[in-house]
Image (cartoon, rainbow, N blue to C red):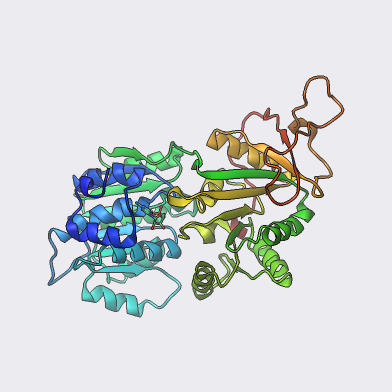
Amino acid sequence: MTFKDLGLSNALLKAIEEKGYTKPSPIQEKAIPKVLEGSDVLASAQTGTGKTAGFVLPILQLLDNDVDYRKRPIRSLIVTPTRELAAQIQQNVKEYGKHMDIKSMVMFGGVKQKPQVAQLREGVDILIATPGRLIDLNNQGFIDLKKVKVFVLDEADRMLDMGFVRDIQIIMTLLPERRQNLLFSATFSKEIRKLANGILTNPVSVEATPENTTVEVIKQKIIRMDKPRKTAFTIKMIEEGDWQQVLIFTRTKHGANKLCEKLNNKKISAMAIHGNKSQNHRTKALAQFKKGEVRVLVATDIAARGIDIPLLPHVINFEIPNISEDYVHRIGRTGRAGANGVAISLVDNDELMYIRDIEKLTRQKFEKEVIEGFEPTHINEADIKRPKGNQGQRSNRGSKNPNSKPGNKKHYHTNNSKKGGGNRGGGNSGKR
Ligand code: AMP
């Protein structure tokens, strides 16, 4: 299947060629024809699958067919949870639409509203916005969404996690009754389905990967370790592996700062992005990381949402997320669009319950590794599956890959016997 087979116009085909894409990704193959024919679409796709082009390309084509060059009312509204994601989508709109006369605009809070108002007055075909500023400017009478033809809710699951449900409801009241709706989400909970039911009309469902499963090209490693050893091991991995571009996740802002400081002390350049950092700092950190000027980006889940870093080779889960869906999002930062990546999770005793939840959600069972020199002092007995007749010893089978860095690994399996599950409260949602 080629992009041409999907029915895209020459202007788009040219831009796609210039981007260097040779063939559509699975989600693009499935979503683009449906969007072009005017259907509502419910798409299960996470970052890294090429989902953005999956909606941006057909929207550009639909809008290009009848541009009102004089007034340019907003004809497509794309709502996203974070500023970074909004900026990234607009970048895509500009790149794919470079051979068309379509005006786009990105809108988010934390920056002055005046330039945004001025840009709105000049006319905008596609508006990409985060909910807060959108509603704010609407309340002030600067936005008219009554001419919207295509509405996109991107990363809907994250929207709900971030408490935007009320905002979404408000935004829906600003849109015309007759419109096309596209909803993208990496995971599908009961709440998401409820939200989708309220927004979409007879939607076509498209799926990039099966629900809640992690992308297969990503190699996932789960390493058991005591909490105080994680920093030393992380430094060792980066130094010995000579890793030049590493994304590290922590659960809390404080944890992100602390790790950053320790890495910098060891002359491994690192910057942190989280909710307490200014928009300027976040943009700068991301740009420097992308250019390779900063070797490590340490991020909390919310701050990392929507970051687009092509071909990211290494992701480290320094702390395991207490919200299982976050694991799927985190490792979606690597192995994107067909490239290989490694996601390494460092798991201490207290985090084993989170790993069990993740195993349940992603319907896989991890083989857990222990690294020589970094063995955990206490291994939860219930987590060790002992071979028959060997009640006293932990099963220490040799590494499957003895050459892989760093150190020698020992494998053992967990006895995933705990029933129940779901996401643990963890009580730190405010710290992320
Ligand atoms: P997304 O899932 O939209 O965040 O896209 C992930 C990455 O894949 C981005 O860097 C895109 O530029 C890239 N990408 C999107 N579509 C394709 C494609 N058909 N071939 C190769 N790369 C792509």
Indicate the quadrant containing the C terminus: top left, top right, bottom left or bottom right.
bottom right
Name which residue lies at 76% across and 45% down: 408
Query: Is residue 146 something that shows in the picture?
Result: no
Q: Nearer the viewer, residue 32 or 250?
A: 32
Residue depicted at 13% across the width and 66% down the height? 68
Asked if 195 appears above or below 365 in the picture, the reply is: below
Q: Please say whether residue 252 is visible from this viewpoint.
A: yes
Residue 323 x/y as whole percent: 58, 46
- Camera-nearest residue between 293 and 431: 293
Q: As drawn, which residue projects farthest toward the top? A: 389
- Estimate the x, y position of residue 414 in percent, counting from the top left: 70, 32
Along the horizontal axis of the image, is 356 left or right of 95?
right
Provide residue 250's location: percent of width, then percent of height. 63, 57
**323 or 271: nearer the eye?**
271
Residue 205 falls in which quadrant of the image?
Answer: top left
Of residues 284 and 122, the one nearer the viewer is 284
Residue 300: where, in percent of width, then height? Answer: 58, 59
**Is residue 313 shown left or right of residue 83?**
right
Quarter of the displayed picture in which ligand 1 can be seen: bottom left
Q: Is residue 149 left or right of residue 313?
A: left
Residue at 63% x, 63% y: name it: 253
Image label count: 0
Judged from this view, the residue extending furthest toward the front is 403
Q: Residue at x 56, y 47 (%)?
A: 327
Where residue 34 sits, quadrant-wise, is top left
Q: Quadrant of the N terminus?
A: top left
Specify whether 195 is left or right of 350.
Answer: left
